[in-house]
Image (tube, rainbow, N blue to C red):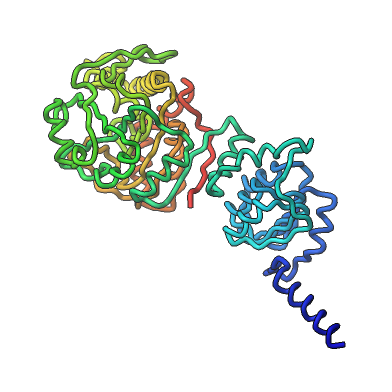
Amino acid sequence: MKKIIFSFLAVLLCTFFIAPAFANKDNNMDKNLMIEKLKNSTLVIYKNGKIEEFKEKGITPLLNYTDKKDLKGAYAFDRIIGRAAANLYAHFDCEFVYGDVISKPAIEILEKNNIKYEYKTLTDEIQNRDKTDLCPFEKLTKDCRTPYEAYAKIYKKIHPEKAIVYFSKEITPEILIKMYEITGKKLTGNVAVKLHSGEPGGNNFLKAEFVAPLVKYLNGTIVECNTAYQGRRNTTRKHKEVLAEHGFTSIAKTDIMDEEGEIMLPVEGGVQIKVNYVGSHLKNYDSMLVLSHFKGHQMAGFGGALKNLSIGIASANGKGYIHGGGNALNMWTCKQEKFLQSMADADKSVVDYMKNNLVYINVMNNLSIDCDCNNHPTPPKMKDIGVLSSVDPVALDRACVDLVYNSNDSGKDTLIKRIEDKKGTLTIDYAEKLNVGTKDYKLVKVK
């Protein structure tokens, strides 16, 4: 009798400690009912008293749901949960998941992200439908280190027409490296880092100590070109002094790319200009990080990746040529639309020349309505927003503009007015027409 009682207690204890913990915070949800519904569906999601059922196979129904709604606080009942699905549940903070079939890698992901789970059948891996190899999405996400990285890969696979833009609210030197790495694009060879050296007197530009870890990580050379207007950066000698004064020469090699003149790049399909004049040293670089401080601009409406890629890489003469819509003598009198079109044309030429060996990062802090080329910029009215990265400059700038417009910060009004007064978003439109990139993007939040 004692043995029977002991055995019963042992089984009871094992059941209590070993069985996956199901924690139903919503007392109105019937777990057994959800599992029963799963017999006629591929995915059942319960959230806030509402049940949604899906019939499509594969990862598609889950991806479609998360494209419109959040999984935070939700209970998901899924036919098959591999590492791909587990990463989606983790990225969107699902409360609990149940799988008819679940893989060991999926469990590792769920446990790492503190998601409660139950399952009917455990398997080593999720195979394809022919049982001849791994499921394609399992292969796709096998080497992903984070849920948001896996989510971006899955989303891009399902929606190849969309660009992926990564976004973090954190603004630190460390996040710059993370935002570069997450793009998945490795810059190789002789790497240029194009940033704004900052006109002395202004204080909003990206500081040397802020960018130093990323520049060193890339073993990059900080590159700039001289300005087309009077100031402290319109000659190579003075510009080098500014680079030293602002601390850039102490963190990395620096290069004024038009120190020895310029080279001419053709503009395929250009609307306003058919050639673009850039610093001749551009030919010395195999790849480039376009590291931009996103802010307003007194001539272009705003400055971001597209402006840094066009005006920033143009020689002093080339800057005037772009501003003048193909005639440097018209630099200060050119019609606004022609100037914006010329910037997009210049973008096209550089992207083609660099063979897309480019990564773009925009830092949205010190959001003045004025450019860093202004030695007395208007003080920022908006609070800092974050850091964004992409391999698509059009999508990146569009995402930044959208974040400004969608912000709850009342200080956005002056920046929006500057953008609209100068018709700034036309550059984005023209660059898309030239296939520099796409405005159709997916914003992926980096935690």
- Please tell me whether residue 397 is drawn above or below residue 113 in the rendered image: above
* Residue that protrudes farthest toward the bottom in the picture: 2
Q: Is residue 24 left or right of residue 334?
A: right
Q: Residue at x 78, y 58 (%)?
A: 120
- Please tell me whether residue 132 is drawn above or below residue 16 in the rendered image: above
Q: Quadrant of residue 325?
A: top left
Q: Position of residue 239 (x, y in %)?
A: 16, 31
Q: Position of residue 152 (x, y in %)?
A: 56, 41
Q: Is residue 173 left or right of residue 32?
A: left
* Residue that protrudes farthest toward the front in the picture: 3
Q: Position of residue 286 (x, y in %)?
A: 36, 24
Q: Residue at x 20, y 24 (%)?
A: 228
Q: What is the total number of numbered labels drawn onto the structure image?
A: 0
Quadrant of image for the N terminus: bottom right
Instruction: Tell me if I can see residue 376 in this picture.
Output: no
Q: Residue at x 70, y 39 (%)?
A: 134
Q: Is residue 32 left or right of residue 335?
A: right
Instruction: Please name whichever residue, 52 or 75, is drawn nearer the observer in this view of the structure.
Output: 75
Q: Residue at x 14, y 28 (%)?
A: 230
Q: Is residue 109 left or right of residue 394?
A: right
Instruction: Please name whichever residue, 129 or 204, is drawn nearer the observer in this view of the structure.
Output: 129
Instruction: Tell me if I can see residue 242 in this picture.
Output: yes
- Please tell me whether residue 199 is drawn above or below residue 333 in the rendered image: below
Instruction: Please name whichever residue, 164 or 112, is drawn nearer the observer in this view of the structure.
Output: 112
* Residue that protrudes farthest toward the right in the picture: 1
Instruction: Please name whichever residue, 388 or 385, is drawn nearer the observer in this view of the structure.
Output: 388
Q: Position of residue 235 (x, y in %)?
A: 14, 25
Q: Quadrant of residue 23?
A: bottom right
